[in-house]
Amino acid sequence: MNIRLILNLLLATIVLAAISVWMGQQSYAWLPPQAAAESKMVDDLFSFLVALGSFIFFGVTGAIIYSILFHRASKYDYSDGPPIEGNVTLEIVWTAIPILLVFWIAGISYQTYERMATHGPMEIVHLHVPGMEEAYAVAIEDTIDPDESIEVRARQWAWEFRYPDGVTSTELHLPVNQRVHLNLISEDVIHGFYVPAFRLKQDIIPDRTIDFEFTPVREGRYRLRDSQYSGTYFATMQTDVVVESEDAYESWLADASGHPPAESFNQAADEYYQASQKSVIPGWKTIAPAPAPIVNYPTSIKDSQS
Amino acid sequence: MTNVPVETLNETQQPVPGAPNNWRRFFSFSTDHKVIGIQYIVTSFFFFLVGGLFAMIMRGELITPEADLIDRTVYNALFTMHGTVMLFLWTFPVLVGLANYLVPLMIGARDMAFPRLNAAAFWMVPVVGILLMSSFLVPGGPSQSGWWAYPPNSIQNPTGNLINGQVLWLLAVALSGVSSIMGAVNFVTTIARMRAPGMTLFRMPAFVWAVLSAQLIQLYGLPALTAGAVMLLFDITVGTSFFNPETGGNPVLYQHFFWFYSHPAVYVIILPVFGIFSEVFPTFARKPLFGYRVVAVSSILITFVSSLVWVHHMFASYTPGWMRILFMVTSMCVAVPTGVKVFAWVATIWGGKLRLDTPMLFALGGLVMFVFSGITGIMLASVPVDIHVNNTYFVVGHFHYVIYGATVLGVYAAIYYWFPKMTGKMYYEGLGKLHFWLTFIGANLNFFPMHPLGLQGMPRRVASYDPEFAFWNVLASLGAFLLGMSTLPFILNMVSSWIQGKPAPANPWRAIGLEWLVASPPPVENFEELPIVTAPPYGYGSNEPLTENLSPSNAAN
Amino acid sequence: MESSLETQTVSVASHAVEHEHDEAGNSKFGFIVFLLSESVVFLSFFGGYIILKTTTADWLPPGVTGLDTQEPLINTIVLVSSSFVIYVAERFLHKENLWGFRAFWLVTMAMGTFFLVGQAREWAGLPFGFTSGVFGGLFYLLTGFHGLHVATGILLQTIMLGRSFLPGNYDKGSFGVEATSLFWHFVDVIWIILFVLIYLWQ
């Protein structure tokens, strides 16, 4: 190895590293706002992976492009390249480095996971294994007071939320900076509770209640989407999550409890009804959507866009 | 000693003289592995166009946020059929076709171990296709539960008919599985027992290693899918309760069955493509495959590791924490043998004498897209990131970089590379290059935008979406239409060159390999005299003859 | 692999001839590969059984207390012993004693049939059906799928028995008999696991 080659390699590495760090910083902008405490942790991890990934991607493609530019055979050069069949040192190095990288990435992902688990939803999910139930039961009772939980009911194709004092709604209201406990329930098929701004997702398996908790930290209106394909009107199964101050949340609850339950607008039920009015049906027969939810705080047409 | 007369061998062969010029044999129950290979490739390409048409209609729907072009049930049927057709009727069969054509030639065999089984396995593919397409005609239409067919969604049967799209879908997938198992038994036996004298394991081309690794996955993985499919079929038709939560069943168990096969299935697809890369790069860089043995062994390693990664598809499906972490680590481990291969290819190209013919362009394009998908793959294996992007367009983008970027580009590379061998004609280089650029630009335009969409939280399998996602969706749709058009120069090239192309020499690329030592197209039974192999497969630059008894001049006639 | 280089030239001659002509060897190899693959179907069913048994709240259908193990145990003994009987039959064929082969082969078939009849009787007397909850489904699925294999084995044995009367049938080797016998051992081993899972682990 001559000095020139080493210097060139060093220079390339520095340039690559600079680009990668910059990409890592950019990556925050590719994601939705950080509306939950968990979002920040996921984004930091993602940024790290983007930086590392950029380094590898630009390194490999850079080498390929360099070869394409500078190692081309001239038109009438029919000779072969150097018969290099391998290089044991190099091969050991490029096996060892990915192994180390993989464990590094896994370690950092695990750390993030643990941090999310200690004050996030990750470990709450558990199997209903007879005999193992007791082991989990203590931990669950520690963290969740059932009276404080908001019940999330998913059905084809509507979301319905039931608050501790009996108020129901079709958009989810949450107080900011407070630990939220949700009981996720599906009445028919598998659905997924997904709020991109929270970076959280959990499939809702029918016939079991899934405990889920997290901490919203940023006031605003975000989208809640069904993330596990649930049939014909899957795409319409969206609603809003409103994160608001404790006071606003309490007054919203009080206000809503004063309303008599009324039928909410439901995109799926509406589309199904519209289609049934037509003489020619443009598609195939579908499972009929559940009737539009009847709740204290219904969504109107203009609130819900799919 | 090895001059075994041809006529005493394998009477199952078609002994028709001049058979290679008879196009009718491509429409017959031929037992010649080369005919079957081409039958696989052409049949699967037809279904590639069908699946592509479905995709273009879907992208047409997605060019606007509203569900306005087609009914939602139609959209859902289309994405289900798109996935099913592309996997079971395009990528699997086209790669099996390539392997069918190449493996016996590459290991110096006169045919596969079981020629009639081979033909039977092929003829199941059109039956699978007809079965699947016929579901458009039954009441209720084709399956609309996605190609995963997760219960209880797939158990719901709005028409109440016993013969419905979902049942036909299951039958088609099961039949395709039977065909694949037959093929896998045949490949493994052929590679294990039919190698020419001197063709030791470490003299087999990397492509053969890759096919062997992929077929081993079929053998251990497909039965699990079959078990799940049988149970799902009973749930749908006779009302058992294996996966039906209403009667005490466990829908998550199905996901385990499904992904135990369907994640490794991606390696069944990508491993032969790795094999193609390993053949094309040395030839067009005029250098031996760097670290050949490591590349070969890493294929087998992928076979083993891939059996332990399936739960990463289920990080959000009620999976306990220990399982999430365990499968995160195993999934990331796949990156090691894969990364070693990528480095080996780059080192093969490095310092070579590159020639950018169409096969090389496609292989290079495929490699770049594969590296990108590998990086997003690591992100998806990381549990916290996956929780966010799972079931979003990020996954769709990642998957299509693997399945289109690496696989389809790799298959194109293979078709151009071995087209002169298969047909005895040269293709048109200009059309080939045009095809490459349309494909490469189209694929990136189509699939790159899916990553930002997924990061922003757009779920997959939606017929309508929030208006904020419109920009990237329009780009993706334009890319899809471009990809659709990119097949036109390809078809034109293939058809016209096969009919009236310039005759191809036995070895147009000056490549090393047994298949290049016989005429183009190779005669029935491939080798008049079985080759005696005396050297490893990639002797570029070292002037070492590959065999004792066959030389390039033999094949000139 | 390098070490084999020296021996290569020596073995080359036999190598080529053997590989081109050893179709029976290929068939046997392929058949073993197929059986290994087939065993994964059973393993998957068993895995599903274990997972469902440990996670289902109401495992047995209402009114069902468990399975009677006595008759199935007799069935099991008969089926497992038939593995030894078919081995003896094979030995006879090996010694070119055709009538000995046929006699023991027939006994194997009888034992297999005894097993199937016993299972059919058990099915007929059970108080639950295929759609009676998770347990009912799994019971019939596993025993039925295995029974299908036993029936296939008996069918193969019938064909082999018929073929043994063809003159010159074993001139090219006895692959059919070997494969059938191998299949029969496979079916028996699967049954042992199945018996432990379904009947003993209640």
Image (cartoon, coloured by chain):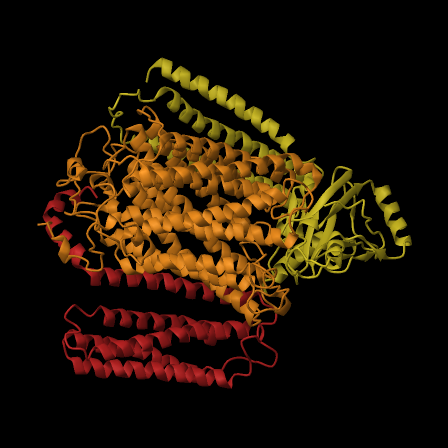
Chain colours: A yellow, B orange, C red
Taking the spot 48% from the left edge, 27% from the top edge, the residue there is A58
Query: Which of the 4 image quadrants contains residue B346?
Result: top left
Give the image location of residue B550, x and y in percent: 15, 40
- Tell me the quadrant of the picture where the C terminus of chain B can be found: top left
Note whether B285 is above or below C110 in the view shown. above
- Residue located farthest toward the top when viewing the structure as drawn: A4
Front residue of A96/B113: it is B113
- Residue located farthest toward the right when viewing the structure as drawn: A258
- Residue located farthest toward the left when viewing the structure as drawn: B1
Front residue of B348/B167: it is B167
Front residue of C42/B212: it is B212
Q: Is residue B338 visible?
A: no
Note whether B481 is above or below C97 in the view shown. above
Give the image location of residue C16, x and y in percent: 15, 52
- Residue located farthest toward the front when viewing the structure as drawn: B500
Compared across the picture, whether C6 is left or right of B491 comes to: left
Compared across the picture, whether B356 is left or right of A56 comes to: left
Query: Which of the 4 image quadrants contains residue C32?
Result: bottom left
Give the image location of residue B468, x and y in percent: 69, 37
Compared across the picture, whether B145 is left or right of B97 comes to: right
Give the image location of residue B260, x and y in percent: 47, 55
Front residue of B503/B119: it is B503
Q: Is residue B342 visible?
A: yes
Query: Which of the 4 image quadrants contains residue A33?
Result: top right
